[in-house]
Image (cartoon, rainbow, N blue to C red):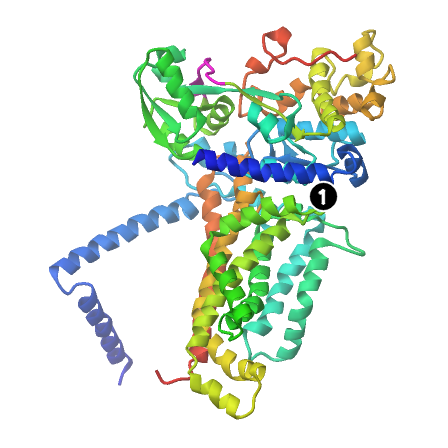
Amino acid sequence: MTKIKSLFISLVLTLGVSTAIAGSHGSTHDLVKERGKLMCGSNTGLAGFGAPNDAGVWEGIDVDVCRAVAAAVFGDASKVEYVPTTSKVRFTVLQSGEIDMLSRNTTWTLSRDVDLGLEFVGVNYYDGQGFMVNKSLGVSSAMELDGASVCIQVGTTTEMNLADFFKANGMSYESVPVETNSEADAAYTAGRCDVYTTDASGLYASRAGYPDPSAHVVLPEIVSKEPLGPAVRHGDSEWADIVRWSLNAMIIGEELGITSANVDEMKSSKNPEVLRLLGVDAGYGAMLGLSDDWAYNILSQVGNYSESFEKHIGPNTPINIQRGLNALYKDGGILYAPPFR
Amino acid sequence: MSSTAIQIISRSKYYNWLVKNLFSSWVNTILTVIALIFVYQVGSFFLNWAIFDADFRYNFQGELIIDRGFCSKNIMPGEYGACWAIIFARWNQFMYGLYPIEEAWRVNLIYALLPLAIIGILFDKIPFRRYFIYFTFIFPFLAYFMLYGGPGLSVVGTNKWGGLLVTLFLGVTGIGLAFPLSILLALGRRSKMPIIKSLCVVFIEFIRGVPLITLLFTANVMLPLFLPDGVNPDNLLRALVAVTLFQSAYMAEAIRGGLQAIPRGQVEAAQSLGLSYWQTTRKIVLPQALKIAIPPIVNTCIGLFKDTSLVLIIGLFDLLGIGRAALADMTWTKLYYEVYVFISLVFFIFCFGMSRYSLYLEKKLKTDNS
């Protein structure tokens, strides 16, 4: 069954790739400039990552990547049209050229990168499967979960990861199968299971909605790798470069301490990398086919990675996610951008 | 007869009815009491939750509710019911999606004109009906111009449309386009010309053999892959194509049922009078067949109207999709019941309206003696 399914998917996507390649005359960059706005594939609504607010304005850290690219290309972060995509149509929507880039919590995997003809340009959120328990259990590590009942969504990779993790550590568990995220929430809060496991960001988002979020703790162990990042179509490296370095500019901005508040003062900085990034030392924008102040526009209009993180999913938001893996490499995380030179 | 006597008679009439239907035996009495308790419990719980203990725009402290933290039930859990503030805060999105709010008057205008556009088709005894029918034919173009934009009006792409606008657009346009198509399909299926007949049979059976969701995926995912680059029919339009094809196949079968109920003698009589095929069809067969087919046609329309919510799978923000987007916003997350109850209510109003209309039409058209 899975074989037939994957065969079918690859057939569809091969057709898609061949038509996309055969039909693509201009580069995506030219198309975007000509159109005057960026078509960005977003989530249909995921708290903190991408969802329209009460005023209908899209917000979230995935959305900020789209805004950064628009700021780099047009000098105006608002020139984005969001195309809501579900997990089922997201890749074909990108393949067919309906959107210029996809930025909606999509895990970078080999088969997607290679077989589906996508190009992942970086990682804007390192996710992974985690465990949440009620504080009253007094558990501080997933190693203490022997014999626990676990709420788990059936038919997902999280189910396999869970089995592997408990087996590898010689522990047993009792699984409480549920169908959807909201059902899992209901089961867990009703006490039908001791532990709730899914991607850590999902756990935080769920917890934020509980009547008493502080009564629940997400354990430090992360048992799978789920690097989420923006993707573009295979075969247009110039455009991939622009998206990749728009994201990198946000990360480097944080490294160098450039925020949307101090970006103008930083223009007179002594640090040569800051001057290169902000376009005071000219020439780097032209390499990408952009204006020299492209990164300045990103940092002044969208802000650096830390600002985006804190604003949408950080500890001061209801979602309340610690930086953890997503801290800069020098702060104990693994967020790392190649040097700007 | 004095008025007291009438009262006594009518009271005893009710009394008799009650005894006969609800308290005729011990078992019935117990069942009645249990049912009454059940209805009271559920009803009072729901009314308390939805109205008496609920927050509308302000919480019990009189503060304007700007996020779910202000909802009374989140301040004093267990004491309070629904928090309808999410519906107020997101009202524009429920009605227009992400349509620019300064342009929303265009949608309002179309909402206001929609009843005028369909009234001429729905009722035949209204004054100036002819002009209403003319308006019906102008309306689609007017609606397209007003909603999408054009000379003099800024263009609002369909990716900004959402909420009730998308639901109504898909429902009304889908049904409107499918109706003529389905008549042709039904006639084609009964045609004596083998090619036309087999084409119609294959089309109807194929469409009826696949779920709507498959058609939506096909239209959404496969269509753009086979079209040349740069030709990207709009997402909403693709969904509309799928919905229309789906509806026309089902409606065609309903109409075929009506066609088959027309006695052969009617057609033969018309032919012997020298009427052509189209004259016979238009003047003799269809008016009778459609009359018979009204209940099943309305059934499929109600079904389709509800099925439009499936488009959220392909990323369109219909009423249900926009509700889910509202729930994904940290400001309002977890107010599931409020959003789903509201959406159900909106769907109910439209579907119940259609169902009542079909009843009215059946009664009106009932000319036989059966």
Which chain does the residue under circle 1 lie in? B
Residue at far bottom of view: B273
Q: Is residue A76 above or below residue B240?
A: above
Q: Measured from the top left, where is residue B181 in percent x and y?
A: 57, 67
Residue for badge 1: B229
Left or right side of A230 for A321: left
- Judging from the image, what secondary structure is the residue with disc 1 in? loop
Choose between B14 and A159: the one closer to the eye: A159
At x 21%, y 52%, the residue is: B34
Residue range of the region highlighted in magenta in the rendering: A214-224
Is B245 inside the magenta-drawn segment? no
Q: Is residue A313 above or below residue B303?
A: above
Q: Measured from the top left, where is residue A192 in percent x and y?
A: 32, 28
Q: Quadrant of the C terminus of chain B?
A: bottom left
Q: Measured from the top left, where is residue B199 in percent x and y?
A: 54, 64
Q: Measured from the top left, where is residue B179 in percent x and y?
A: 55, 67
Q: Amino acid at mark 1?
A: Asp
At x 45%, y 62%, the residue is: B352
Q: Quadrant of the N terminus of chain B?
A: bottom left
Q: Tell me if residue B349 can be seen.
A: no
